[in-house]
Amino acid sequence: MDHNIDLRLNKDVLMLLENARLETYEKWPNDKTWYCTPEKLAKSGFFFNPSSDSPDNVCCAFCRKELDCWDPDDEPLAEHKKHSPKCLFLTLSCPVENLTAVEFLKLVKDVTVFRASYFFDKAISTFESQAADTRQEIIKHISK
Protein backbone atom coordinates (compact mmCIF):
# COMPACT_ATOMS: atom_id res chain seq x y z
CA MET A 1 0.00 0.00 0.00
CA ASP A 2 1.37 3.40 -1.03
CA HIS A 3 1.16 5.96 1.79
CA ASN A 4 2.67 8.85 -0.16
CA ILE A 5 0.50 11.95 -0.43
CA ASP A 6 0.13 13.48 -3.87
CA LEU A 7 0.56 17.22 -3.32
CA ARG A 8 0.31 18.28 -6.96
CA LEU A 9 -2.11 21.15 -7.17
CA ASN A 10 -5.20 20.37 -9.18
CA LYS A 11 -7.42 23.21 -10.39
CA ASP A 12 -9.79 23.00 -7.39
CA VAL A 13 -6.94 23.35 -4.92
CA LEU A 14 -5.17 25.98 -7.01
CA MET A 15 -8.32 28.17 -7.04
CA LEU A 16 -8.07 28.44 -3.26
CA LEU A 17 -5.16 30.83 -3.92
CA GLU A 18 -6.06 34.46 -4.66
CA ASN A 19 -3.47 34.96 -7.42
CA ALA A 20 -4.71 31.88 -9.27
CA ARG A 21 -8.29 33.17 -9.05
CA LEU A 22 -7.24 36.60 -10.29
CA GLU A 23 -5.56 35.07 -13.37
CA THR A 24 -8.95 33.69 -14.49
CA TYR A 25 -10.28 37.22 -15.14
CA GLU A 26 -8.26 37.82 -18.30
CA LYS A 27 -11.44 38.10 -20.41
CA TRP A 28 -13.65 39.75 -17.77
CA PRO A 29 -16.45 41.43 -19.78
CA ASN A 30 -17.38 44.22 -17.37
CA ASP A 31 -15.77 47.65 -17.26
CA LYS A 32 -12.57 47.55 -15.24
CA THR A 33 -13.37 51.01 -13.82
CA TRP A 34 -16.33 49.61 -11.86
CA TYR A 35 -16.09 49.29 -8.09
CA CYS A 36 -16.71 45.57 -8.62
CA THR A 37 -13.31 44.71 -10.09
CA PRO A 38 -11.64 41.38 -10.85
CA GLU A 39 -9.21 42.10 -7.99
CA LYS A 40 -12.06 42.51 -5.49
CA LEU A 41 -13.84 39.44 -6.84
CA ALA A 42 -10.69 37.31 -6.51
CA LYS A 43 -10.01 38.71 -3.03
CA SER A 44 -13.59 37.71 -2.10
CA GLY A 45 -12.98 34.07 -3.05
CA PHE A 46 -14.35 34.07 -6.61
CA PHE A 47 -12.83 32.91 -9.87
CA PHE A 48 -14.20 33.84 -13.29
CA ASN A 49 -16.42 31.07 -14.69
CA PRO A 50 -18.39 32.48 -17.65
CA SER A 51 -21.00 30.74 -19.75
CA SER A 52 -22.91 31.77 -22.86
CA ASP A 53 -25.96 32.58 -20.69
CA SER A 54 -23.94 34.30 -18.01
CA PRO A 55 -20.86 36.11 -19.36
CA ASP A 56 -19.92 37.66 -16.00
CA ASN A 57 -20.48 34.53 -13.89
CA VAL A 58 -18.10 33.92 -11.02
CA CYS A 59 -17.80 30.91 -8.73
CA CYS A 60 -16.50 30.67 -5.17
CA ALA A 61 -13.50 28.36 -4.99
CA PHE A 62 -14.58 27.29 -1.50
CA CYS A 63 -18.36 26.82 -1.49
CA ARG A 64 -19.01 26.72 -5.26
CA LYS A 65 -21.68 29.44 -5.04
CA GLU A 66 -22.07 31.06 -8.45
CA LEU A 67 -23.09 34.70 -8.91
CA ASP A 68 -23.64 36.76 -12.04
CA CYS A 69 -25.29 39.94 -13.34
CA TRP A 70 -22.85 42.16 -11.50
CA ASP A 71 -23.63 45.86 -11.18
CA PRO A 72 -20.91 48.54 -11.21
CA ASP A 73 -21.30 49.31 -7.49
CA ASP A 74 -21.69 45.72 -6.19
CA GLU A 75 -19.41 44.83 -3.31
CA PRO A 76 -18.21 41.24 -3.95
CA LEU A 77 -17.54 40.31 -0.32
CA ALA A 78 -20.94 41.62 0.81
CA GLU A 79 -22.63 39.67 -2.00
CA HIS A 80 -20.70 36.55 -1.00
CA LYS A 81 -21.82 36.90 2.63
CA LYS A 82 -25.42 37.50 1.55
CA HIS A 83 -25.67 34.54 -0.82
CA SER A 84 -23.48 31.99 0.99
CA PRO A 85 -23.15 32.95 4.66
CA LYS A 86 -21.78 29.54 5.71
CA CYS A 87 -18.90 29.55 3.21
CA LEU A 88 -15.55 28.54 4.73
CA PHE A 89 -13.82 31.40 2.91
CA LEU A 90 -15.72 33.84 5.11
CA THR A 91 -14.31 32.20 8.26
CA LEU A 92 -10.63 32.50 7.32
CA SER A 93 -8.61 34.66 9.68
CA CYS A 94 -5.84 35.29 7.13
CA PRO A 95 -5.23 34.87 3.40
CA VAL A 96 -4.80 31.26 2.29
CA GLU A 97 -1.28 32.13 1.15
CA ASN A 98 -0.32 32.81 4.80
CA LEU A 99 -1.47 29.44 6.12
CA THR A 100 1.05 26.85 7.24
CA ALA A 101 1.21 23.62 5.24
CA VAL A 102 -0.77 21.82 7.95
CA GLU A 103 -3.40 24.59 8.07
CA PHE A 104 -3.64 24.53 4.27
CA LEU A 105 -4.16 20.76 4.17
CA LYS A 106 -6.83 21.08 6.87
CA LEU A 107 -8.53 23.78 4.79
CA VAL A 108 -8.49 21.54 1.70
CA LYS A 109 -10.06 18.77 3.79
CA ASP A 110 -12.69 21.13 5.25
CA VAL A 111 -13.57 22.53 1.80
CA THR A 112 -13.93 18.99 0.44
CA VAL A 113 -16.21 18.01 3.33
CA PHE A 114 -18.25 21.23 2.94
CA ARG A 115 -18.74 20.60 -0.78
CA ALA A 116 -19.64 16.94 -0.22
CA SER A 117 -22.17 17.91 2.46
CA TYR A 118 -23.75 20.46 0.11
CA PHE A 119 -23.88 17.89 -2.70
CA PHE A 120 -25.46 15.22 -0.50
CA ASP A 121 -27.93 17.67 1.09
CA LYS A 122 -29.03 18.71 -2.40
CA ALA A 123 -29.32 15.07 -3.51
CA ILE A 124 -31.38 14.20 -0.42
CA SER A 125 -33.66 17.18 -1.00
CA THR A 126 -34.18 16.17 -4.64
CA PHE A 127 -34.86 12.57 -3.62
CA GLU A 128 -37.36 13.64 -0.94
CA SER A 129 -39.17 15.86 -3.42
CA GLN A 130 -39.33 13.10 -6.01
CA ALA A 131 -40.48 10.62 -3.35
CA ALA A 132 -43.31 12.96 -2.32
CA ASP A 133 -44.38 13.36 -5.97
CA THR A 134 -44.26 9.58 -6.48
CA ARG A 135 -46.23 9.03 -3.28
CA GLN A 136 -48.95 11.38 -4.56
CA GLU A 137 -49.06 9.55 -7.91
CA ILE A 138 -49.42 6.20 -6.13
CA ILE A 139 -52.21 7.54 -3.91
CA LYS A 140 -54.01 8.86 -7.01
CA HIS A 141 -53.82 5.44 -8.69
CA ILE A 142 -54.88 3.57 -5.56
CA SER A 143 -57.89 5.79 -4.95
CA LYS A 144 -59.27 5.33 -8.49
Image (tube, rainbow, N blue to C red):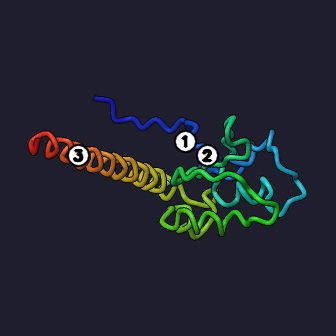
Label 1, residues with CA under 10 Å away: few <14, some 14-19, many ≥20: few
Task: Please state the total of marks drawn on the protein image.
Answer: 3
Q: Which residue is at a point 34% across and 53% down the rendered structure image?
A: 121
Circle 1 is placed at which residue position?
Answer: 12
| Residue 117 circle label | none
From the top left corner, tell me how far across and down residue 23 is, in percent: 75, 43
Q: Secondary structure at mark 1?
A: helix
Label 3, residues with CA under 10 Å away: few <14, some 14-19, many ≥20: few
Q: Nearer the viewer, mark 3 or mark 2?
A: 3
Residue lying at the far right of the rendered structure: 33
Q: Earlier in the sequence, mark 3 or mark 2?
A: 2
From the top left corner, tell me how far across and down residue 117 is, in percent: 36, 53
From the top left corner, tell me how far across and down residue 22 is, in percent: 74, 48
**Contact (CB < 8 A) between labels 3 and 1?**
no
Q: Which residue is at a point 42% across and 51% down the rendered structure image?
A: 109
Circle 2 is placed at which residue position?
Answer: 15
Question: In the rendered view, does 85 fall on the left or right side of 109?
Answer: right
Q: For this rendering, which residue is in front, 131 or 43?
A: 131
Circle 3 is placed at which residue position?
Answer: 131
